[in-house]
Image (cartoon, helix red, strand yellow):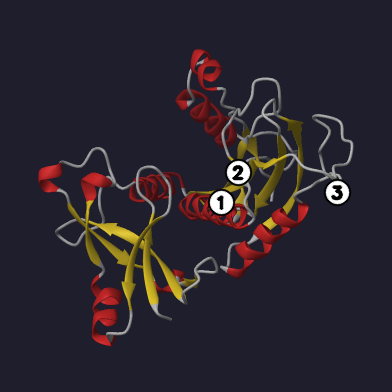
Amino acid sequence: MKIINLCHIPEDCRLKTLSFAVKNRERVYDILEFGERVDGSSLFSYIDPNKSDIYIMPRIESAFVNLFSSIPTLNILCEYFDENGKPLHIAPENILLRAEEKLRSSTGIILKALTELEFYIIHKWEEPDFPRVSERNYHESTPFAKFENVRNEILITLEDISIVTKYGHAEVGRFHSKTGYIMEQHEIEFLPQNLDKMAETITMAKWITRNICAKYGISVSFAPKPTLEHAGNGMHIHLCGLKRNKNVIADSKGNLTTEARQMIGGNIEVCPKPDNFRKHYTQFIFAVYLP
């Protein structure tokens, strides 16, 4: 390897990169052991610019070869620490970890999430093109699904960096835009993971999807509602509640348990009110997952 990238996920949930040449072995050891200082106020809007020193610390077990770099490069995901060497209190990942631990310590319940990631692949219309019906793209195959091979390359690349997927398929949305672009919808679904791990998985999946699309000169949109007239992109999150490795969502007769009703009520309580649903065209779905 000639480059090491320390990668991290700040407030905007997009993968950031700090790069190092690795010819100096002692410098490499220092980076891997101590991480590096970065400007926290440029990564988090709620960090005071006058007290902005934070640190990114590599998680060595997360290292993977960057398949999109023309130079041999190793990417390593990092955690955030404050100037005193403690986990950064306000980092989203640490907030989520504390919430998970509070739920586990107070109820004994561990939540796992199964996420469906939907997106539109966008390309300039060109011949040849096969006749298709708008909004009838569900599970469509090549040649009627133009970007099946792109989606399958995304699946393979995710597996190459140890992100386990459930499956991928063409989703219902497909149309020609008024500006002459094909917009074709696809979905990749992931197997259940702890909430903090799933949040990281979604960020990495978007990073991989965008890089592969860029390689082929096409674009991608994860926007909840790219157009009003056509199917939107839902990021459906199914929650699985486990206590001592047993499902707490349903009882022996298949009925919802008290814990499940509390989970549903809590999600409804924190969701935006109806006006906000309409304003942002965002789809919120709560589902219970029976393992």
- On the image, the x and y values in percent for residue 154 come to 65, 58
- Mark 3 packing: few (<14 Cα in 10 Å), some, or many (20+)? some
Q: CA distance from mark 3 to mark 2?
A: 19 Å
**Residue at (86, 49) in percent of width and height:** 143
90 horizontally vs 140: left or right: left
Mark-to-mark CA distance, 3 and 1: 22 Å
Number of labelled discs?
3
Q: Amino acid at mark 1?
A: Arg
The residue under label 3 is 141
Q: Is residue 142 left or right of residue 60?
A: right
Q: Nearer the viewer, mark 3 or mark 2?
A: 2
On the image, the x and y values in percent for residue 239 come to 59, 42
Residue at point 63%, 34% (across, down):
234
Q: CA distance from mark 1 to mark 2?
A: 6 Å
1 and 2 marks in contact (CB < 8 Å): yes
As drawn, the label of residue 220 is: 2
Q: Secondary structure at mark 1?
A: helix
Q: Residue at x 57, y 22 (%)?
A: 281
Q: Is residue 47 visible?
A: yes
Work out whether residue 42 or residue 80 is closer to the camera in this orientation and state it: 42
